[in-house]
Image (cartoon, rainbow, N blue to C red):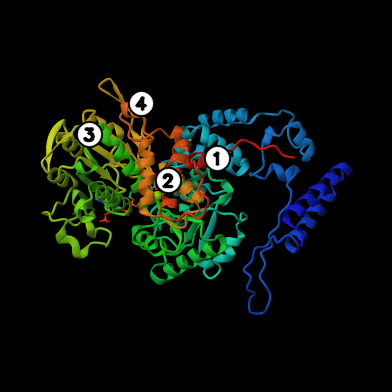
Amino acid sequence: MMSLRRYTSFLLLLLKKEKEKESRQSLGWLVMESRRLLNGVAGGVDEDLRGNEDGHQLLTPWASSVASGYTLLRDPHHNKGLAFPEKERDAHYLRGLLPPAVMSQELQEKKIMNMLRQYKVPLHIYMAMMDLQERNERLFYKLLIDNVEELLPIVYTPTVGEACQKYGSIFRRPQGLYISLKEKGKILEVLKNWPERNIQVIVVTDGERILGLGDLGCQGMGIPVGKLSLYTALGGLRPSACLPITIDVGTNNKDLLKDEFYIGLRQNRATGQEYAELLEEFMFAVKQNYGEKVLIQFEDFANHNAFELLAKYSNTHLVFNDDIQGTASVVLAGLIAALKLVGGKLSDQKFLFLGAGEAGTGIAELIALEMSKQTKTSIEETRKKIWLVDSKGLIIASRKETLQHFKKPWAHEHEPMRTLLDAVKAIKPTVLIGSSGVGKTFTKQVVEAMASFNKVSHRHDKQILVLIHKPIILALSNPTSQSECTAEEAYTWSEGRAIFASGSPFNPVEYNGKTYVPGQANNAYIFPGLGLGLIISGAIRVKDDMLLAASEALAAQVATENFEKGLIYPPFSNIRKISAHIAANVAAKAYELGLASRLPRPKDLVEYAESCMYNPVYRTYR
Ligand SMILES: NC(=O)C1=CN([C@@H]2O[C@H](COP(=O)(O)OP(=O)(O)OC[C@H]3O[C@@H](n4cnc5c(N)ncnc54)[C@H](OP(=O)(O)O)[C@@H]3O)[C@@H](O)[C@H]2O)C=CC1
Ligand SMILES: CC(=O)C(=O)O
Ligand SMILES: [Mg+2]
């Protein structure tokens, strides 16, 4: 058997000889020969060792070849466009295939940013960015990293929401893996069709709750693709280690079912056993194909499946649900930071949520856990400071029988309250959090009421004097159209006193001669660093304490100059440094809990996390 290293040297030697002879024709032979050798000799096929019943092993016709010439220019992982230097143009048969100019990556970046800035429609920038990703991956990531605050609203919320709604019409080349009901019984084979084998993180959706836009079926693929581009740009994971997956079990979206350009299965959603079996097959195929340490991030599933999937697989797989857990961690971080602006402790606050689904109850539970740890009281006790409103009104004890299981812990004794305004007036929260997916629900009256009882005031809480200065208002719903209120509304209606952050970004607001800068309370601050921390420590399970560790790390990154602007999150321009700190805290927790498999533990985890991060600068080719 020839080892892979020896085989590679052999190939390179042949290539060199070919170059010397300048015999371009025989490259085809070389590629064919490489396929033959890889299939037969170098173990290029990593198949299940068991044969099938008739004794024949099923083989994936996997092949690897050295890209050169025209093929190299069309390989997004290696293409550098005009940045190929003269030497590489000679060595890789690029002469004549490129115009004579040689351009640095920096100049290419400047050129593309200039071009993107000419577009008036954000969706057109999105499409240009996707084209770039398919053409030149390193340039795409360089742009995204260097211009993160400008491009995040494009590849992520809000524009990615519109892209998903129109995915069928703007669809050019497939990105990611589509696993539909048609693939039932064959999911392992489908995974093997993916060209990369060393996968570290999968973001998977079934498209049923895409942002606050509802069921977008198979077109939800834009979300895993977008989230994974942030794993690389913000968290430093290798693009080739990231796999976006959409599970297509149909859609109940009537408009999509009628849309001639819809790309998914044209049927209503499969539910119950049929759904559960497909997901079960998927989860075990992933583990079988990629091993125990591949991270699976559930994204934008509807809550009737999300909680169950998380509970079912959190003890057998390295999984987390971004909407439940990532959102909880980012909001807790913002609240810990906000205490510096409003005074008091977390347990001095009273919380009211509009929306009691994945995001709402996920956040509520993590806040209650943190308060319970800080005050050394039971979680049942700390939950009493948190109230939630759903589409039927305030969640109270008299509704308990009919509530979904994830709402039951929040059913406290209270008289019924049908509207948010009534609930706000009755509960008098210091923190109001919107996670309903419904825009414009924080009305003028709601914000004014929040401002009226969160003035500089003295409040007695269990004989302790607490000073409350400002209302904290978080409008988490995405995209912008679904935001519970705008930044301008929050600042104007509260007469400039609200501490405000939102899921989708808003521009700074001028009010009474002062500029107010809203923060972005979005799980994008957490999941890239959390994922990096899990991967660098070789963690095998995700635990709540890791989410708390991520929150602490994020809150600690808010600097004095950010607080001075009223911000409770650090700017995204520092996100890679922030992600390294989050990763280090998460990894440290994984080691502490005995869940880390990468041994020995690196001494300086921040430095180690930074050293593991993908850098999109072009590499030099032999
Ligand atoms: N900023 C961020 O990082 C994140 C933001 N989000 C956003 O949060 C939103 C909700 O997501 P998620 O929690 O997963 O969704 P869910 O569907 O799980 O929950 C939505 C909740 O809102 C309630 N609701 C819906 N309409 C109303 C209404 N008119 N008045 C009061 N309550 C209402 C629902 O009530 P009922 O149960 O009665 O139907 C339900 O409790 C989405 O817009 C999403 O984009 C989500 C994750 C992260
Ligand atoms: C941000 C996010 O995950 C959501 O809106 O669903
Ligand atoms: Mg989400």
For the residues labelled 2 and 4, say whether their Cβ atoms are less than 8 Å apart: no
Looking at the rendered image, the quarter that the N terminus falls into is bottom right
Q: Name the residue: 58% across, 40% down.
A: 132
Residue at far top of view: 513
Q: Give the alpha-carbon distance from disc 1 to disc 2, as whole Å.
A: 33 Å
Instruction: Identify residue for label 1.
Output: 611
* Residue 561 disc label: 4
Label 1 or label 3, whichever comes before in sequence order: 3
Q: Position of residue 569 (x, y in %)?
A: 36, 35
Q: Name the residue: 20% across, 50% down.
A: 387
Q: Give the alpha-carbon distance from disc 1 to disc 3, as whole Å.
A: 37 Å
Relative vertical location of residue 438 with respect to residue 206 in this rendering, above or below: above
- 10 Å crowding of disc 4: few (<14), some (14-19), many (20+): few
- Closer to us: mark 1 or mark 2? 1
Q: Give the alpha-carbon distance from disc 1 to disc 4, as whole Å.
A: 28 Å
* Residue 161 disc label: 2
Q: Quadrant of residue 80?
A: top right
Q: Amino acid at mark 2?
A: Gly
Cβ of mark 2 under 8 A from ligand 1: no
- Closer to us: mark 3 or mark 2? 3
Q: Amino acid at mark 1?
A: Ser
What secondary structure is found at the residue carrying circle 4?
helix
Q: Position of residue 282 (x, y in %)?
A: 49, 64
